[in-house]
Amino acid sequence: MGLQLPHGGPHVLHGGQTLKVSITSIDVAGKRVLVREDLNVPLSDGGIADDTRVRAAAPTLQHLAQRGARVIVMSHLGRPKDREPALSLKPVAGRLGQRVGREVQFAEDCVGERATTAVDRLQSGHVLLLENVRYHREDETNDAGFARRLASLGDLFVNDAFAASHRAHASVVGVAAYLPAFAGELMEAELAALHQALDNPRRPMVAVVGGAKVSTKVGVLRNLLKKVDLLLIGGAMANTFFKAKGWPTGSGLVEDSALDEAKAVANEAGEKLLLPVDLVCARKMQAGEALRILESDKVEPGWMALDIGPRSVREFTQRLKGAGTVIWNGPVGVSEIRDFADGTKAVGEAIASSGGYTLVGGGDTIGAIESLGLAGRFSHVSTGGGATLEYLEGKELPGIAILKEA
C-alpha cells in the first residue's frame, strides 16, 4: 500500500499545539512494554484476508524488540459476544511474526493467570500477543478494574492503535491511568500526517470527499470548509446535494433525512463547493449495463448516477493540478465495479500527480487505490478509518488525549 512511516522525532504534534512523547525517545531495555495495536484484520476461512493492519503495526514492535524491550501486544478482533473461537487472535500471531521478523508468542487470555504467566516468562527482545481484549466485556465499558489488570502486565504503555483511538476503551484509554503512556510509530505517522495536512497546509488546499452518505460526513465537511480553498464532492452523496437544490435524481441513492444538512453545507461553502456537472448513469448498479452520460440536473426517471462524467473528470482534475495539499476521503463513484471506476481512477491519478502533500483515508478509498493501481503514490495513506474521520471533524480523540505530553 505504500504506508510511509516517517519518524516524528522524539515528540509528535497533535492539533497544532500539543506535543506527545514518542516511545522512540524512551529507554525500553528490559522493560515490559504494553502496546495497543489495531490487529482487527478481515478473516476468511480461518485465515487473514488482508494483513494491511499487521504490516502497519510491525515497525513499532520490531524496533521495541530490537531495543531490548519485553513487548506485550494487545488488540481487539471483531465484536465477539462471548469467547468465540473464530475471533481468536491466535492466527494473527503467526502473520505478525512474519512481519516483525521474529517469533511472536501467544497468551490464551489478556488478563489473569494465563496472561501473567506468559508475561513472566517473556525475555528481553521477545514479543507476546495477548488474546482478544473484547473477550472481556469490561474492555468496551472502560472498566477501571479491568484496565488495572491489563496495566499490571506492563511497565510502560504505548498506544499505536490510531484506528481505535476514538474509542474510550480500557485497552486504549483506561490503562493510561496506571502506566506512563507514549505514542507508537504508527500513531506518530498518523498524527504527523494529519497535522501537516490540516494545521499547516501548503496552499491551495483541496478536499475531495465521496462515499454514500452525507450524514456520516457532515461534521467532516463543516470542519474542512473552515480550512480548505476548494471542496470537491462526488459519489452517491452528491445526489443528496442535487436533490437539496431541487434537481431530479432518478432512481439514484438519496439520503432524504440529510437534505437540510446538505443545503446548509452548500450555503456555507458558497464558491468553495464543486459538484459534478455530468454523471455516468445506468438503470442498475451492475457490470455490463447500458450507460448514458446525463447532465447533473437532468437525471431521468429509472436512471441512477454511478460515477462522475467526463466533463466533471476534466474539471476535477484541472482543479487538482498544482494543489499544495489534498485530503481525499471516499471514491467518487461505485469504484468496485469496473464500469463505474473511471472517475475515481482519474481523480486518484490527478491527486497523486498534483505535486502537493496528499493524505488519503477511508477503507473504500484504500480499496479503490489498491485495485486501480494507484497504491504507493500518495504522501500518507491513513489506516485510521472512523478515527481519521473524527479527527477530520475536529474532535479530540480519547486515545490521543491520554498520551504523555512533552
Image (cartoon, rainbow, N blue to C red):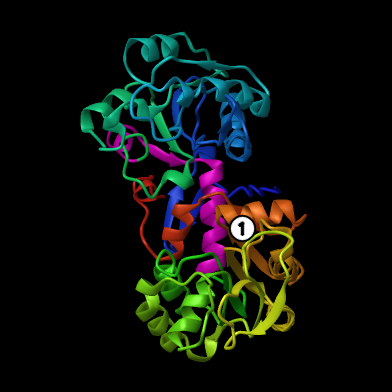
Does the magenta-highlighted stretch encompass residue 129?
Answer: no
Residue at image coords 72%, 84%: 311
Residue 2 visible (yes or no): yes
Q: Identify the amino acid type marked 1.
A: Thr
The residue wearing badge 1 is 365
In this rendering, the answer to whether 171 lies above or below 209 is above
In this rendering, the answer to whether 401 lies above or below 308 is above
Q: Residue furthest bottom?
A: 271
Q: Residue furthest front?
A: 302
Residue at image coords 36%, 61%: 395
In this rendering, the answer to whether 291 lies above or below 152 is below
Indicate the position of residue 126 as horizontal and vertical percent values.
56, 17
Q: Which residues are magenta?
A: 173-199
- Left/right placement of residue 278 relative to residue 23 reads right
In this rendering, the answer to whether 212 lies above or below 151 is below
Q: 238 or 323, which lies in front?
A: 238
Mark 1: few, some, or many residues within 10 Å (few <14, many ≥20)?
A: many
Does the magenta-highlighted stretch encompass residue 183?
Answer: yes
- Left/right placement of residue 33 relative to residue 355 reads left
